[in-house]
Amino acid sequence: MLHFLAKRLPSVALMLVVTAVIAFLLPRLGGGDPAQVVAGSDATAEQVQAIREQMGLDRPLPVQFAEWVGQVATGDLGTSLISNRPVAQLIGARLGSTLELAVTATALMIVMGLGLGILAGITRKGAPRALLDGAISVLLATPPHVTGLILILIFGITWRLMPITGEVSVFDDPVRGFSYLIMPAFALALPQAAMIARLVDARMAQVRQEEFVDLAVAKGVPPRRILLSHVLRNSLGTAVIATGIRIGEILAGAVVIEAIFARQGLGMLAVTSISSRDYEVVQIIVLFAVVIAVLVHFASEILLAALDPRIRLDG
Amino acid sequence: MSANDTHPHHPAGRRPRISAGTARYLGAFRTPRGMIGGGLLLVMLLAALLAPVIFPGGVDMQTRENFQPPSLIHPFGTDEYGRDIFVRCIYALRISLSLVLVAVPLAMALGILMGLSGAVSRRLGEVCQRIFDIILGFPSLVLGICIVVAIGAGWLALAITILVFSLPQFGRLARGALLTEQTREYVLAAQVLGVPKRKVMTRHILPNTLDPLLVQASLSMIAGIFAEAALSIVGLGIQPPTPSLGTLLNVGIRYVYAQPMYTAGPIIMLLLLALAFNLIADALNAAVLNAKRT
Amino acid sequence: MADDILLSVRDLSVEFGSAQQPLRVLHDVSFDVARGRILGIVGESGSGKSMTAKSVMGMLPEGGRVTGGDISLAGRSLVGLPERELRRLRGHDLAMVFQDPQAALNPVKTVGWQIEEALTVHGMSARDARARALELLRQVGIPDPESRIDEYPHQFSGGMRQRVVIAIALANSAPLIIADEPTTALDVTIQAQVLRLLVELRARLGVTVIMITHDMGVVAELCDDVIVMYGGRVVERGAVADIFDAPQHPYTRALLRSMPQIGGDRLSRLPAIPGATPDLSHLPPGCAFHPRCALAEEVCRRTVPALSPIPERPQSEAACHVAQREGRLPPEPAERGEVDAAAGRSFGRAPILQLEDLRVDFGSRRRLLRREPPFYAVDGVSLEVFPGETVGLVGESGCGKTTVSRAVVGVNPLSGGRILVDGRDVTAFDDAAAAHVRKTVQYVFQDPYASLNPRLTIRQILSEALEQRGLPAAEREAECQRLMEMVGLDRGYLGRYPRAFSGGQRQRIGIARALAVEPRVLICDEPVSALDVSIQAQVINILADLRDRLGLALLFIAHDLAVVRHLSDRVAVMYLGRIVEEGPAEEIYARPRHPYTAALMSSTPRPRPDPGAMGRKTVLGGDPPDPRNPPSGCRFRTRCPIGPLVHPERRICIETDPALAGDGRHRAACHFSGEAARLAEETKT
């Protein structure tokens, strides 16, 4: 187990370093001189130069990078050059909205993904099989933003069942909160759930072909027990890893979904920050999104290792 | 592909290889799925190409009334300035199709090169795999945001985004095929015969790599088309007023009560494109599996 | 035959596919199994033997159905029994042992859990099940069962896993156990362990066993009765002794004759069966064997012969028109192959291929912080092959024999030693050396399905090789045709793709490709082990013919000692990356001087009925050690039947690595090489 984790660690570390470098470089890639922005457009060259030195922008990039990483690691996320407010504060104000959306969507994704996957996995033939196959294929091929727009057209415009824009925190008013949350969360979760379902279904079909399932049948084990102890138990790893990867996609999908449903979350903040060239905010959001995605993925690998005795005991 | 249709006196018999390989892929388009998918794509391609001829009024041609409901003349109705939404959708196809038809083949070529680089140098191959891992570690839209920040929103940023995030799919498939092919006994046999490495690559390894890659290309086209929409909806892609499926949705969603077709129209286009490429991917996949089975 | 019939199968027919286009895989299969006996079901791929077992278990794959006949277990009909009832019988009254022990156990559950499951689903309490599981593990010979019961399958070796599978089959003391090729995936020394266990269990517990196998040797040494299947039908049925003594179906007879023998006279040519095993979807009309049968007559092409007793030998039943009419199976036109004349063949003086102290390092990959210690898959192998000579390289899987052969052709890089081809040092394998090797040494691969590129026609495959020989394009067509004729294939086949050919034909094409560059040495890596028994002889004969006609030297790699004996002039035996014995084939087979060679020979099943054979065999205990971590001293000492395991005073085996030594050309790496021959002797009597 430790050996397996030790083997995975370098690639996790590499991923984190690369993300940090990209996030760090974003404001510099985005063009525009931060010192100029701070100084204002009518500042003299000397003033700009002074500010540059004050901000440490004249030092070599690696030094700036090390300093920035140090700051972020100690919780100093920097200050927006546009609004002059601490980035942490800007993000904090939006975090709740995105968390509500992401957590709801993740829960939906896991429930629907596993549910559909297992349902497809135990439905091997006939019309129900074709139906499930078709449904999963369609959901899989339709990304969150298109799913979201279709949901709006159907439930918001045609039937007028749900509010299509805005939000209320579920902690303030659970019923209204969820009524605002339900469509964006579904839109985010459906395509990812379909992906998980497809993988779980395929894995179950594969496990079913294994000789140990035949041996279980030959032992006289009842079908329900074969499904649980043999087929599902050996498909769990796939489900865990698939879920781990998809959580990152949910975070990214939130950017578009928030725009479509006019939710004031982090995704919306990222988009408006890019438009206003507020790269100090963008870099932190990017960093967080990737770090969370990487860590969730790593966590799912640890879980996988714990589930599989071959890795747990040897690997 | 019966056994006796080759010329008995053909000296080196190069001919059947070409016909056998390509005939298989072409054969995919003779199946019902391939025909519908291919036909649909062809119609949309032609419409996009010939849009200026078909709609000489151009993309900004205005009618008298805004927000007209769908009618025979304006199948998707009109927008806030009274422009025909259908015409704008057709023009939008030009962006979507040009993006993926440029970016995906480039990604495929680069992916094959990077994926097969392991055959030249093991280390180079490993490095390429690491790069793919990193790209895949990024949630796809986050990657798009970084690229947009770096080079500014627009067609180029979208093309690069599509290229970068479809690259690992091709690269991994190519590498996977390389790793399995390299240990195939017929590749070893060619090696033992002394067939030069380059020829082993082009004759034995590459053709067997191509099968999954072509299917993946169709799927990447869909992903690319949707990616344009996603980034443009949030304003990080094509910039209004240029009509792309994403920019249309960006504006359309604001008027969704007044003109639902403003949103539904581009979505119909998106889904038709996805359907076309999906059917083609299905048909190719079936043709590939079929050839493997017999 | 005992009157106490446990299982009776009558006119069983099984079909797959739709009702409109059924594919019939079993045709009127009938047999009985008497209590306490072992019935062998023998056949090649597509004969329907596994399908028969699955029908009895009620475990036909999806789409399969019994369309006729009956199966009754102890008087109770199983056909049409509801699934609930069947489930109660499975594991309780009928148990099964599967082919691949690597795949037959659930990887995420402990072996104890898996044995206990077999008990608890039939109503035993968890506590009793645990006690019974321990008892079963002890019964199947798993050492230290108390601690191993909570281990996972991957912590067991292949042989040990098969024991666990057998323990599961024994769990509820089921009266009938069906074993479906239980040793095919195992090495010969491990196969011997498992077969001996089955014999012991039968003696101790009185279980009845149906043994499904393709190996006539296993049938002869293990079974009491046998049915021979071909094309989904039973073609012959009777007691093992009777059928091996005088087979009454031409297929059985031809199959027995075409097998190379590990003992007895060596034939120069094997009496091969022509053609290929039929595809179940295109069975020939009439007797399915008629296209390959030397005795076939008009009636054989038209009507299917019934399985009935042969007038002059009423104890066996055969489905053959000719045998039934004549009263017994008439002798075949060409009766027996001549005894080998090759003893007098002469070989070149200077070796064409010379390996000196070859080492191949596998898996010493660089890790993040440390470099793993090197692991030699091949550790100091020296071998010479002379022009015109055939050297057999024998050993079990993982011993390094294939690694040696691939190193010679430059596929595996060397980490030590020298290779000389035709006197020239090619160790560096630079361009010039590579070119020299390519035109002198060629390779025939194991898997005929993987060794031909499915996208190229045979003409293209052969032309590619001819191009390497430097033959101008204009002359290649004629040469392709010549090559095809050389390996006995129609030149009209040149335009076809590999998928149009059977396994045996593909292997011939592989040989033709290797010969296209006119090499002087042919390395054959298990060239027949992937082929059906009835096809093996064809390929072996072609190799022998070509060798003699073209004066080729062969380095013949195989795990099957009988095949090696048939072809080889000299034999080298490998164990754990080393050659442990080397010498002239006849001498080694007559008087082995290494206990490993003796054990290999003893473990190999012989197609000669011998009820006591299993008891006399020298069966090696344990498993081959991890090559990453070879034992000190003699590498074989951890399994050696004459080493420190039995003679604790023999410290020398632990302390000193024996060198390959001996008088003249027969050398062995053993401190007590004089005792090995005795081991082999004991088995024969």
Image: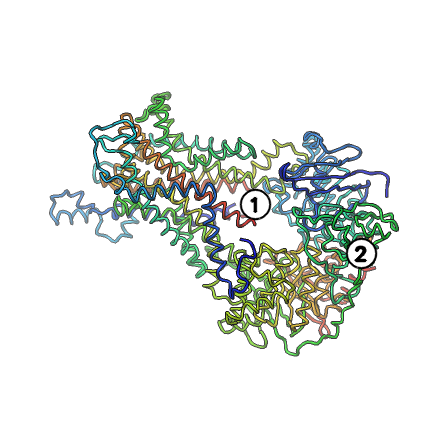
Q: Give the percent coordinates (x, y) of residue B122.
A: 45, 59
- Give the chain letter at badge 1: A
Q: C565 or C303, which is in the foreground?
A: C303
Q: Is residue A103 visible?
A: yes
- Give the chain letter at badge 2: C
Left or right of B16: which side holds C590?
right
Q: Give the residue furthest to the bottom.
A: C349
Callouts 1 and 2 on one subunit = no
Q: Is residue A170 visible?
A: no
Q: Residues within 10 Å of mark 1 (few under 14, many from 20)?
A: some
Left or right of B190: which side holds B132?
left
The tag on residue C608 is: 2
How is colour applied across the structure in the image? Answer: rainbow
Mark closer to the observer (1, 2): 2
Q: CA distance from mark 1 to mark 2?
A: 43 Å
Kindly state the secondary structure of the residue where label 1 is placed.
helix
> What is the quadrant of the N terminus of chain C in the image?
top right
- Which residue in the protein does label 1 denote? A310
Q: A315 or B225, which is in the foreground?
A: B225
Kindly state the secondary structure of the residue where label 2 is placed.
loop
Query: Which amino acid type is shown beneath numbered disc 2?
Result: Arg
Q: Residues within 10 Å of mark 2 (few under 14, many from 20)?
A: some
